[in-house]
Amino acid sequence: MEKGFTVWFTGLPCSGKSTLAQMLKDELVKRGFKVEVLDGDVVRQHISRGLGYSKEDRDENIRRIYHVAYLLQRNGIVVITAAISPYREIRQEARELLKDFVEVYVKCPVEVCMKRDVKGMYKKALKGEIKNFTGIDDPYEEPLNPEVVCETDKETPEESLQKILRKLEELGYIEPQVYSEEEEEIIKKRLEDLGYI
Amino acid sequence: MGIFKRRKRVLVISWDGVPFSFLKKGMEEGRFPLFSKLITGGAFGRMTSVLPTISSVAWTSYMSGKNPGGHGIFGFIDRKPSPLSFFIPTGKDRKAEFIQEVLSREKKRVISINIPMTTPPFEVNGILVSGFLSTKIEKATYPPEFSRVLKEMGYIIDANPVKAKDRKDEYLEDLFLALRKRFELAERLIRERWDYFHLHVMETDRINHFFWKKKDERFWKFYSEVEELSISLVEKAKDALLILLSDHGFCTLKKEVFVNKYLEDGGYLFFDKEPPEDIRDISEKTVAYSLIPGRIYINLKGREEKGSVEPGDYERVREEVASYLEKLTVDGERVIKKVWRREEVYSGPYTDLGPDLILEPVDGFDLKGNLKKETLSGETHIEGMHTRDDAFLFVKEREFTKDNLSIYDLFPSILSEFSIKVSSDGEVCWRG
């Protein structure tokens, strides 16, 4: 059985967590891993339904996420979580329980996140229609020592993905892979056209 | 003179596949005026490259100072003996430390652009941009975020060689563009702080492969631009020790020769499936097979998946195959200059990964590794091929201390400029 591990994305709303989580999932599936994504928005519709956005409820939500992650991880599944998880203390709890834990800080200035505002949530929060919105009237505690920092206002999603993959390789969670199957075909073709193979 | 001694810097510009003889003859004919002037102030000589004479092997030897038996890279394609399969070696497969890593460890700042076999990029104390074995810019740099700079400037990893077959004008335009982007990047980075700066020009190899026979006006225009851009870069770092070199020579390609067809005709190679689709289709009756260019593997029992040659019979069989291969002719002309036993050219812990025999061809015969061909030789649109003993080396304000320069010598020689002593298969080859 493959060893499970958890990639824990954290960052402001609309910082790019879900996008990167999905890209990472696709890449790891291609490499033969069993992968589950625990997306914050989806989790709140199911296992955390009814929880609000007070600190207590947010912490409870994260506890549920890391507990599910624990169950999956110990069965050899790679777990990718994509929740704001704004508080350091609860992320530390998750790290301590899960142990094979790779924290990815999806860093993006709140102004840029507000411009993205995929679901119009920032707009509502600014109007006061949503309370306790992280980045507006609720704090976000930046990770102090994340394994990876992706600056999504400066990097392309592909660059951020490569950063994460390199770190996972470095930490020994995934085998270094220079080429995907598709890329290997590209290189073979290039070498054939040059008469090198 | 100030209180502080100026830091020693080394600037290397490499022109892939540019022969010593080509430069020498060109200069005699009045070409390469800037280069002609430049070499009056240093040592200029012919240099021997590696076997097989391929850029991936040659540059791995340059960067490591080791022969393939010491670094484990034997070609652009290699095989795993059991289960028998092909793979494309990259920098991950090399087993020796590279000069950029040694210098980084010594706290020297390194800038390395476009050298083959630096894919995937590795950590250096500075910036590294991988060469043409990279598939996308996002995966081609250390640090990874430097790829943004490349994207913004429209950097090109390699001109697409598929065009060289029937859209040569377009391909040439692409080569010019790739060349200019390469130097644009170099001009930008040379202004940074560095101790070792290496720019590799791959496009010279490309133009030689596809435009070597006619050497028309466009060919010479390309070389003039290579020369001008290079000298312009040199001007930006006059205090640095300048090294210009190539990794192999070039000659006109007369015929492609299909070595596996010859082995099959001689009763040394058989297939389970006709036509074979993959190397796994070779049969247990096989005695030997070949990979490009001229690498011969004995189908040794215990090593190869379908091994048939008993270990006790290895030497006899290898000699028999070598003797057969020496007789290979095409159109009445001898094809093989020399058949090397691997222990004659390789040494070190990874020698066993290499071929049992290495064929060095007569100039003009390009040895191919196609599994199945109907004919022993064929024509191709590729006009030029590599030669082993005609690379060049120029070192400014130095004199050579030996006649038989080898690409293995660069590693210890460059490091000695930084007072770093290393073990290698080469030796310090200049003084001054």
Image (tube, coloured by chain):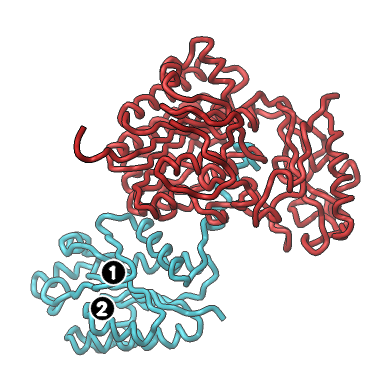
Mark 2 or mark 1: name the one nearer the start of the chain: 2
Q: Chain of mark 1?
A: A
Query: Disc 2 designates what residue?
Result: A85
Q: Which chain is red?
A: B
Please name the amino acid that badge 2 sits on. Answer: Ser
Taking the spot 54% from the left edge, 25% from the top edge, the residue there is B45
Q: Nearer the viewer, residue B262 or B299?
A: B299
Furthest residue to the top? B29
Query: Disc 1 designates what residue?
Result: A105
Q: Which chain is cyan?
A: A
Against B313, residue B238 (above or below) is above
Spot occupied by residue B339 in the image (x, y as percentages of width and height): 78, 38
Q: Could you tell me which quadrant the N terminus of chain B lies in? A: top left
Against B225, residue B47 (above or below) is below
Taking the spot 55% from the left edge, 18% from the top edge, the residue there is B24
Residue B222, disc: none
Looking at the rendered structure, the secondary structure element under dot 1 is strand
Dot 1 crowding, Cα within 10 Å, few <14, some 14–19, many 20+: many
Instruction: Work out whether residue A67 can be spotted.
Output: yes
Image quadrant where residue A112 sits: bottom left
Nearest-to-viewer mark from 2 and 1: 1
Q: Could you tell me which quadrant the C terminus of chain B lies in? A: top left
Q: Chain of mark 2?
A: A
The answer to whether marks 2 and 1 sit on the same chain is: yes
Spot occupied by residue B90 in the image (x, y as percentages of width and height): 55, 52
Instruction: Work out whether residue B132 can be spotted.
Output: no
Taking the spot 52% from the left edge, 20% from the top edge, the residue there is B219
Please name the amino acid that badge 1 sits on. Answer: Tyr
